[in-house]
Amino acid sequence: MWVLLAVVVVVVGFALKLNSMLVVTAAGIVAGLIAGLSPVAIVEAFGSGFAGSRSVTVFVVVLPVIGLIERHGLQEQARTLIAKLRGLTTGRLLASYLLIRQVTAALGMTSIGGPAQAVRPIVAPMAEAAAEREHGPLTEQMREKTRSYAASADTVGVFFGEDIFVAVGSILLITGFVDATYGLTLDTLQVALWAIPTAICAFLIHGYRMLRFDRQLARMAAAGGAIDGKAALR
């Protein structure tokens, strides 16, 4: 029962809008002390958890590398490449990226791309360059909307694509929860197969929205970017 004090620490910390890393660390220390662990054992538990989380370690290594190559002209090269591809509009570019993310996620390669690794340094600048080529200098509203569509292509692609891969965490969570709660035996392969129609529908719907985005940008450019979000969706 006293271990629940760690949950209280988390709730109070987030309510006070403190640094999330410090809040979680404090909650872990509180839980460890209440459980009877020594300070050395708590530090060892933190170290083992960090070393076992390869994704965190890789992220720490990859992020500075992305910052360095971005500083040395990655975004400019992405814009130059788009300038050479005359037939590639913003909508077509983002729809293509949506398809790539969905296919790679379905094959288990969810780490390819992502908001920090691909969207901000590569995809969003390319989408902005395609929009500038078609409509001239972008207004702040057009630029922010283009970036939001680039982020949505990444998120939707991964969210609906990864469920097709049988070994992904969400599939294992679904089968484990249903088996333990209802006494059933779900086949992970069957769950993954039933995710395919949903993924196809998600691609068709969001891909269509991406292609329509070209017309929204044209209307916003004609109105000087004064169209609000609801008007742009019509």
Image (cartoon, rainbow, N blue to C red):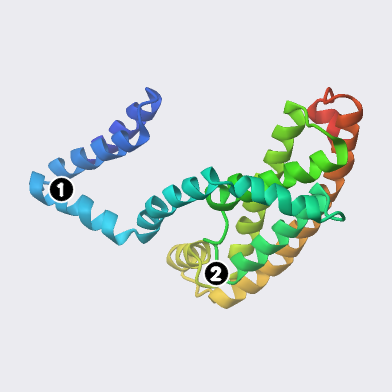
Please provide percent x and percent y for residue 60. 38, 50
Identify which residue, 217 or 158, lies in the foreground: 217
Q: Quick one: which residue is furthest to the front in this view?
A: 72
Which residue is denoted by mark 1 in the rendering? Answer: 42
Where is residue 177 shown, x and y percent of the image? Answer: 46, 62
- The residue labelled by disc 2 is 108
Instruction: State the image quarter where residue 50 is shown.
Output: bottom left
Q: Is residue 135 left or right of residue 160?
A: right
Q: Find residue 154 and name its label.
A: none
Judging depth in this view, the residue of 114 and 188 nearest the camera is 114
Quadrant housing the C terminus? top right
Place residue 125 in its image quadrant: top right
The answer to whether residue 156 of the structure is visible from this angle is yes
For the residue pair 198 and 95, the one nearer the viewer reads as 95
Give how far across and how far down residue 183 sits, in percent: 46, 70
Chain-order first, disc 1 or disc 2 = 1
